[in-house]
Image: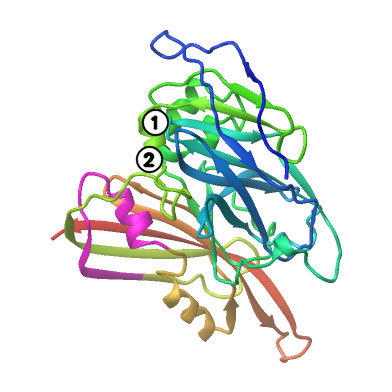
Amino acid sequence: MKRVTGYLLLLPAMLLAGGSALAAQADTKVNHKAIGHFVPEKRIRVEARVNDPKGVNLVRAYFKSDAHADYLFVPMEPLGTDPNSYAGCLPAPAASTATMEYLFLVVNGGKQVVKTAPPVTAKARADKDAPSWQMGCGNDQLTVWKELPEVPSPTGAYADSVAMDVAESGARFGVVAGLFGGGGSSSAAVAATGASDAGSVALAGAGGIGGGGVLAALLVGGAAAAAGGGGGGGGSTPDSPPPSQQLYSVATQTTCTWSGPSLSTPPSYSTTLSNQNLPGGSDPRDVYCHTFRPQPNSNLTPIATQLSQQGVSVGSWSRNFCNFSGTAGNMQEETMASALVCDQFGQNCFTESSMLICNTSDSFTPQ
């Protein structure tokens, strides 16, 4: 197992919005045995040992494949046997996937965002048996996060039951670290995280993650680092729900469209729910995305029932985005559906598939 230690190289400091500069010097050490290959259609378990004298606030694994160009992430949780070791599961790559790329991102107790670099690249291998690092992830639906709402969902890139969610603006640490283009401390990146300041990037090397790796560290303001939550980045990113409770009446409207061949009349559904006891306070985004709509399928059972009555079956739902604007919550989910199609004589039947995209709007009225 290789260890990130050694010298520090400080790049020229970048000016802050206020005109001053900070040098971010991270003492974070990340130990990880790089994965050399994977078997498609099986989840990938990644582990890393993380130490920092300032403490560790969260650890994430960012990943992408040759079938999906944008980084997604999963939170990594501390292992019970060793609180300094963290593990997370990447979704099962599709059968056609040739390569997977991943790296680790840490937010330490000093409010520094640290990423490992360069990313590890693993290649697909058509083995009969999966390696040990593709075991122990279970079969439950896996929640995967993206940082930019406009990033397209990885439809077809993963052969897995995946729920997509979007990180709140206060926890987009990948943006701060420069994973989505541009410099790690650009003003746009800092604004995207709600960070109050940003310092110079520090590189630490000698050995590295999987050989030749380095750590890149960026100091961010308290607003961003504090928003990341505990050890693994949490199942709900960012802003903690207000402690008070509030009764809401929630008017829900879901409408769906076919993005491919129309397998049925586009389904729709509406209802009003009274006396919903949800977190109150000034930030209703948590009410919608992390409390009222925590998982896909939470509002789509009537849609699936309508489709079933018309001979259409649906797969697992994936969430494209979930956000709150004004007094309404907005969410988009999608699934692959299929139906048996025959000619007018009931012969020459074949199975046709199409993507169903459903948009849900919830209007919250305090009671």
| Magenta span includes 277 | yes
- The image shows residue 9 at horizontal and vertical percentages of 64, 17
Q: Relative to the observer, which residue lies in front, 145 or 273?
A: 145
Q: Position of residue 144 (x, y in %)?
A: 55, 55
In the rendered image of this protein, does residue 130 appear above or below residue 28?
below
Which residue does the image show at 38% across and 55% down from the upper left? 289
Write down the region rendered in magenta.
270-294
Which of the marked residues, 1 or 2, is nearer the chain's N terminus?
Answer: 1
In the picture of the structure, the residue carrying the numbered disc 2 is 227
- Identify the residue shown where x is 75% and y is 51%: 35
Instruction: Report the disc number at residue 194.
Output: 1
Q: How far apart are marks 1 and 2 (CA)?
A: 9 Å
Q: In this view, does 30 lie above or below 125?
A: above
Q: From the viewer's perspective, is residue 12 above or below residue 170?
A: above
196 sits left or right of 39 in the view: left
The kind of residue on which mark 1 rests is: Gly
Q: Position of residue 247 (x, y in %)?
A: 17, 62
Q: Quadrant of the C terminus?
A: bottom left
Question: How many other residues sit within 10 Å of disc 2, few (<14), some (14-19) or many (≥20)?
Answer: many
User: Which residue shows up at 45% across the image and 33% down it?
Assistant: 54
> SS for tag 1?
loop
Quadrant position of the N terminus in the picture: top right
